[in-house]
Amino acid sequence: MAIGEICNREVVVVTRETTITEAAQLMRQHHVGDVVVVMEQGGLRTPMGILTDRDVVVEAVAASLDPATLSVGEIMTPDLATVQENTGVFEAIRYMRDKGVRRMPVVDADGDLIGILALDDLLELLAEELGALARLIAREQNRESKLRP
């Protein structure tokens, strides 16, 4: 299964110039723990960073900086790991593990932002698949007990 099939396509985006206060308000309004920092050019939204709720706490609040005057570009995580929409689930999991990230923007072949993949999305998918395997075992046992009483 390709990541493009399971990623969340409703991504909250900001620019580098957005204030930390504005970004935090967007996170609260949309009930998300991150915003993707994009550069909009030629109709494309190219991801260039990510700002998480943890970044806000560790880099701004704990450092007693004024979030109303601090820009996203000043504290965002710039070394952004992205994944192509046609990447397989297990390859994406491996990539997230190697990069040590819980969230990755999903891009198309042109580098345009199309979604975001979170660890929560993967856990939900894997839990469904494990449940299906458990049901398979139960059905197989039931089938065998009927065929060989």
Image (cartoon, rainbow, N blue to C red):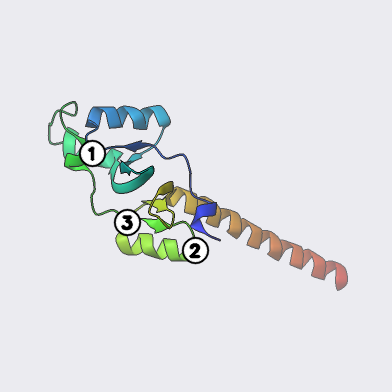
Disc 1 target residue: 16
Q: Are marks 1 and 2 in contact (CB under 8 Å)?
A: no
Q: Do the residues labelled 3 and 1 touch (CB within 8 Å)?
A: no
Discs 1/2, front: 1
Q: Earlier in the sequence, mark 3 or mark 1?
A: 1
Q: Earlier in the sequence, mark 3 or mark 2?
A: 3
Secondary structure at badge 1 equals loop
**At 52% across and 59% down in the image, what residue appears?**
2
Image quadrant where one finds the N terminus = bottom right
Secondary structure at badge 2 equals loop
**At 23% across and 32% down in the image, what residue appears?**
20
Q: Which residue lies furthest to the bottom in this view?
A: 148
Front one among 119 and 2: 2
Packing grade of label 3 (10 A; few <14, some 14-19, many >=20) is some
Q: Which amino acid does label 1 sit on?
A: Arg
Q: What residue type is labelled 2?
A: Gly
Rounded to the nearest angstrom, the CA distance separating label 3 from label 1 is 17 Å
Disc 3 target residue: 81
- Whether residue 149 is visible here, answered yes or no, is no
Q: What residue type is labelled 3?
A: Ala
> In the rendered view, does 86 fall on the left or right side of 79?
right
Residue 55 higher or lower than 107, as above or below:
above
Image quadrant where one finds the C terminus = bottom right
Front one among 48 and 29: 48
Point out which mark residue 88 bears.
Answer: 2
Front one among 13 and 146: 13
Front one among 42 and 70: 42
